[in-house]
Amino acid sequence: MKNARGFSLIELMIAVAIAGVLVAIAYPSYTNSLIKGSRAAAKSYLLEVAQKQQQFLLDNRAYGTDAEVKALLAEPKEFTNFYTLAITQDAGPPPSFTAKATPKGSTRQKDDGWLQIDQTGAKTSDKPDKW
C-alpha cells in the first residue's frame, strides 16, 4: 500500500474557505481602524491649529489667515493625504476664526464627515458623534 502525501482537494478547499471567512471578518475592521486613525490625526491637527491661532492672537492682536497659520505649522501627511484645511477669520470685534477639516472625496475618509473648531474651542461636526 502506498503512503499518501500532500493534501486532498477537499482539505485545500476547506482551508481556503476558512481563510475567506477570516478575511471577510477582518478587512472591514481593519478599514474602520484606519478611518478612526486618520480622524484622530485630523482632530489633533485642528487642536494644534487652534493653539497656534491663540498664540497668533496674543502676538498680533488678530487671528491669522489661512496662509499665515499654515506657514507656522507643518501639515502631517496623515492629515494632508485625507483632509483639506480651511481657516476663516473675522477681524471682529471681537476677532474670531474657524478651522475646518474636510475629507477629500477620493479617499477612504470621504464618508467620514467634516470636523471644525472655533476660537472658543467649540468643536462641531456634521456627524456629532465623531468629535
Image: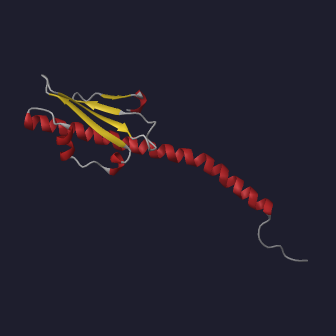
Q: Where, by quadrant of the figure, is residue 1 drawn?
A: bottom right
Q: Residue at x 31, y 41 (%)?
A: 44
Colouring rule applied to residues = secondary structure
Q: Where, by quadrant of the figure, is residue 82 drawn?
A: top left
In x, y percent, where is residue 36? 43, 42
Q: Residue at x 74, y 61 (%)?
A: 12
Q: Residue at x 30, y 49 (%)?
A: 76
- Which residue is outermost to the front? 106
- Which residue is outermost to the right? 1
Pick the front one: 110 or 123: 110
Question: Horizontal placement of 18 versus 25: left or right?
Answer: right
How many numbered callouts? 0
In x, y percent, where is residue 15? 71, 58
Pick the front one: 87 or 27: 87
| Image quarter of the C terminus | top left
Asked if 62 appears above or below 83 in the picture, the reply is above
Q: Where, by quadrant of the figure, is residue 35 drawn?
A: top left
In x, y percent, where is residue 104? 39, 41
Pick the front one: 4 or 39: 39
In x, y percent, where is residue 128? 40, 27
Asked if 25 appears above or below 7 in the picture, the reply is above
- Which residue is outermost to the top? 93
Q: Residue at x 16, y 36 (%)?
A: 64
Asked if 11 appears above or below 28 in the picture, the reply is below
